[in-house]
Amino acid sequence: MTATTTAEKPAPKTRATKAKAAPAAGVAFPDFEAFQLPKMEIPSMFREATEKSIESAREAYAKVKTAAEDATDLMEDTFETSRQGVVEFNHKAVDAAKENADAAFTFIKDIMSAKTLAEAIELQSTFARKQFDTLSAQTKEMQELATKLGTDVSSPVKEAMEKSFKDLKTK
């Protein structure tokens, strides 16, 4: 038999391990020198210009944010005013419809109890005249309410626009 000798593999070479420094914050590959940013001094003029630009951007952002908040408040106020006005307008319309229906039912009851044709014609004439006056008053009241609603809704927008134009003229 042939003797086979087993060659032993040499143990892996160990390198002396260096104590690694903590990786720099924000560096993707802290161990690779090629990926590290060079250390250089930024010229003071460039730094000042950058700081001024940043400050200007912050001021512009603050102005835009304030304008957006004011616009949002204006829209919320306008919608709430509109909602309240429409609710009030609808209540008036329902009240008018109820008043007209009650008058019609009363007229029907009265005309059914009329004894003569002359009495029925007199009731009809009186009802028509009264309904004309009532409808005229209701129409006037609804028109006044609609005008008030339009003014209430548009006045905050008008004031905001005037303020904006005034601010633009002063700048």
Image (cartoon, grey):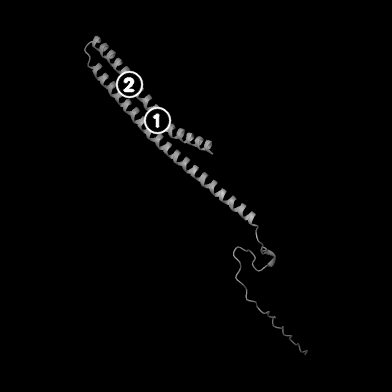
Q: Which mark is residue 40?
A: none
- Which of the two discs, 2 and 1, sits closer to the camera? 1
Please give left or right for residue 117 compared with residue 61 in the image. left
**Residue that appears at 40% across and 35% down:** 81
**Residue that appears at 51% across and 35% down:** 165
- Give the labeled residue for mark 1: 149
Give the answer, above or below, for where 24 lies relative to 75.
below
Residue most extreme to the top: 118
Q: In the rendered structure, which amino acid carries the disc numbered 1? A: Leu
**Residue that appears at 43% across and 35% down:** 156
Please give left or right for residue 61 compared with residue 37 in the image. left
The mark total stands at 2
**Residue that appears at 34% across and 31% down:** 91
The front one of 5 and 34 is 34
Disc 1 is placed on an element classified as helix
**Viewport quadrant of the N terminus:** bottom right
**Viewport quadrant of the C terminus:** top right
Inter-mark Cα distance, 2 to 1: 18 Å
x, y (%) of residue 43?
A: 65, 57
Q: Are marks 2 and 1 in contact (CB under 8 Å)?
A: no
- Give the labeled residue for mark 2: 137
Quadrant in the rendering for residue 116: top left
Mark 1, other Cα within 10 Å: few <14 / some 14–19 / many ≥20 = many
x, y (%) of residue 163?
A: 48, 36
x, y (%) of residue 67?
A: 50, 42
Q: In the rendered structure, which amino acid carries the disc numbered 2? A: Ala
x, y (%) of residue 90?
A: 36, 30
The front one of 8 and 167 is 167
Disc 2 is placed on an element classified as helix
Please give left or right for residue 94 compared with residue 60 in the image. left
The front one of 163 and 113 is 163
